[in-house]
Image (cartoon, coloured by chain):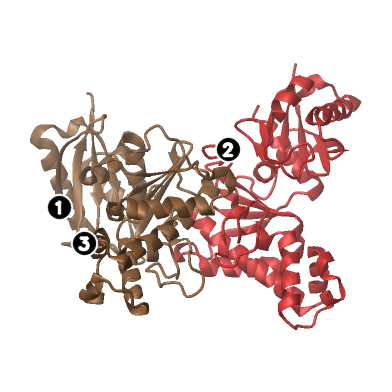
Chain colours: A brown, B red
């Protein structure tokens, strides 16, 4: 019997998004469940399985599903496990959850998982801005900074499955910001949505530049506030994106020295800042590149619809099955 | 007719070393010619070809040679070219030399080339400290800092063949040292033999710590002088290796975040410093790693005899033919 579809699942801290995908990358149908309403992974797996079966059997049958791909924070492709996932209610530090096995046993379908940024990279390669590319780096600029590295047409997993933690390269070696990972000065503490908000609070504290951001209580400033202010021409806010782009560009130049990619593809909330972020990134990257690469490395924004991208990325894993 | 041997050639700024190698990694016979006595690549290719033929036909025949592997600075694996090789007399900036083609046409054997650090990585993987490893990073600490990155058992070449320029990641973003590549603050300006000598001159200039290095004219201090002084317990000299190791360890931690290797393998003159360099590297790397990798990444010194290593590395390329 033919199995023309796969299921892609994107598990985040609050929700799990589930979609049925065909070989052309059409999301035929989708749904979502909460991922934060239980601390017991078995309950979560049961809820997820019921949701998958309900979604699939509405218009198709489980026999038509080739397999399930899952993108999940701290997912280990080699082991099928979720490790130390502090942002997942049923995860937690020192946890080691055999999610692929539990889920596969329950739904009787093959399941493959990877971390969310790797899934995004697969999605871009299969359906998005990186179609046809064999060497590129995916950077997700969300609450944190994630990365998926593609070399020779395959995701780079490394010795233990955890390659591509580019949000945690050290960008500031003295007096760097404290990072959730236990280090200081990580890229993520500057170049994520939370990093942008931290920069805003720091600038308000340490400069006397006029800004409409000063009308917001510092502790509740978000990257969205900074974006709105910058759009209205607020100098401090524009400076914050300039600074964020500069740090990203510096980091990208080092990434290029590592894997010499054709492109760096950006995805996630911060990319809404558009040219305010894009221009300083490209300028700073080229300033910091070795001459042989200057002007030659593409920086691209994802072309996938944000609501579909995570599901598509995860689904791309299932086609490997 | 069986072809049981390959020829490995290591081209450096002054000499080209040539060896016949069997499948077990024995260098059966070797010779060397000058590489700096002509500015004409055709003359160099002719000299090299004559030397190869002479070496091979002494005890074997050209028919027994499967192919030739060449390690050369700025060698491009994809194109078989040598690009902008400022350290080669017949190279120079903006040069683009089709060395593999020229050489192959002359000796009537297949020729494959790559850069010298990639060749060293292949040598370690085929015959040395990285035997059996599928993910490791080779770092050569010589006059400069070179690198060869192995992922999934293959060298990482990237989109254009130039991946693995880890000597040119930026380690010092403010007031960094000027690098030959056109940037400032590159790892190579601190952690190479010349970097060690630069650090010595800087320390002599900017501190008043007593040191036997002060007896040498600053401009003629070499890394060997620093090594000899440190061996005799000279505090300033020991501090220089401490500083060099610290920067290397910081860089390695970022490399691990990229490709999550099983090991980082070190090769080249500076490794003679042994524990004086090894201990600060390992300490600094672990301090700067994400917790998940701390204590888990091996740092190894090459196990290949230095005189054979470059030839063996280049020869490993020829077995791919």
Residue drawn at the location 19% of the way across and 30% of the way down: A64
- Where is residue A69 drawn, in percent x and y? 29, 42
In the image shown, does A281 or A9 lie closer to the viewer? A281
In the rendered structure, the answer to whether residue A237 lies left or right of residue A172 reads left
- Name the disc covering residue B161, or none: 2
Residue A119 shows in this picture: yes
In the image shown, does B11 or A277 lie closer to the viewer? A277
For the view shown, which residue lies furthest in the right direction?
B58
In the rendered structure, the answer to whether residue A257 lies left or right of residue B70 reads left
- Where is residue A100 drawn, in percent x and y? 30, 48
**Could you give the CA–CA distance between mark 1 and mark 2, rounded to whole angstroms?**
45 Å
Q: Quadrant for residue A88, please give it.
A: bottom left
Residue A194 shows in this picture: no
- Where is residue A224 drawn, in percent x and y? 23, 61
Which quadrant: the C terminus of chain A? top left
For the view shown, which residue lies furthest in the top direction?
B1
**Could you give the CA–CA distance between mark 2 and mark 3, rounded to whole angstroms?**
48 Å
Q: Which element carries disc 3, helix, strand or loop? A: loop
List the residue tagged with mark 1.
Answer: A33
**Mark 3 and mark 1 in contact (Cβ < 8 Å)?**
no
Q: Quadrant for residue A228, please give it.
A: bottom left
Q: Are the numbered discs 1 and 3 placed on the same chain, yes or no?
A: yes
Q: Chain of mark 3?
A: A
Q: Which element carries disc 2, helix, strand or loop? A: loop
Q: Residues within 10 Å of mark 3 (few under 14, many from 20)?
A: few
Residue drawn at the location 21% of the way across and 33% of the way down: A26
- Name the disc covering residue A40, or none: 3
Q: Which element carries disc 1, helix, strand or loop? A: strand
Q: Chain of mark 2?
A: B
- Relative to residue A311, is residue A213 depicted above or below? below
């Amino acid at each position: 019997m033919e199995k023309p579809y796969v299921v892609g699942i994107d598990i985040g801290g609050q929700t799990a998004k589930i979609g049925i995908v065909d070989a052309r990358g059409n999301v035929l149908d989708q749904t979502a469940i909460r991922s934060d309403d239980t601390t017991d992974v078995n309950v979560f797996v049961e809820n997820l399985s019921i949701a998958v079966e309900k979604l699939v059997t509405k218009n198709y049958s489980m026999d038509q599903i080739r397999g399930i791909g899952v993108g999940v924070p701290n997912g280990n492709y080699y082991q099928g496990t979720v490790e130390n996932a502090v942002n997942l209610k049923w995860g937690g530090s020192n946890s080691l959850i055999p999610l692929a096995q539990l889920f596969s046993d329950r739904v009787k379908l093959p399941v493959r998982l990877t971390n969310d940024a790797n899934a995004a990279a697969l999605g871009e390669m299969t359906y998005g801005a990186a179609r046809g590319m064999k060497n590129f780096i995916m950077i997700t600029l969300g609450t944190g900074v994630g990365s998926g590295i593609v070399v020779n047409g395959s995701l780079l997993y490394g010795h233990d499955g955890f390659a591509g933690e580019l949000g945690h390269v050290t960008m500031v070696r003295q007096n760097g910001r404290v990072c959730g990972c236990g280090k200081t000065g990580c890229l993520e503490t500057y170049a994520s949505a939370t990093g942008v908000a931290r920069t805003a609070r720091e600038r308000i504290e340490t400069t006397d530049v006029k800004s409409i951001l000063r009308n917001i209580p510092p502790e509740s400033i978000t990257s969205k506030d900074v974006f709105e202010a910058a759009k209205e021409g607020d100098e401090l806010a524009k400076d914050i994106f300039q600074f964020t782009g500069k740090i990203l560009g510096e980091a990208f130049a080092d990434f290029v020295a590592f894997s010499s990619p054709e492109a760096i593809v950006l995805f996630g909330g911060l990319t809404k800042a558009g040219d305010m972020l894009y221009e300083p990134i490209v300028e700073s990257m080229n300033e910091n590149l070795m001459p042989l690469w200057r002007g030659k490395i593409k920086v691209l924004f994802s072309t996938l619809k944000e609501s579909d991208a995570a599901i598509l990325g995860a689904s791309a894993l299932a086609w490997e099955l």
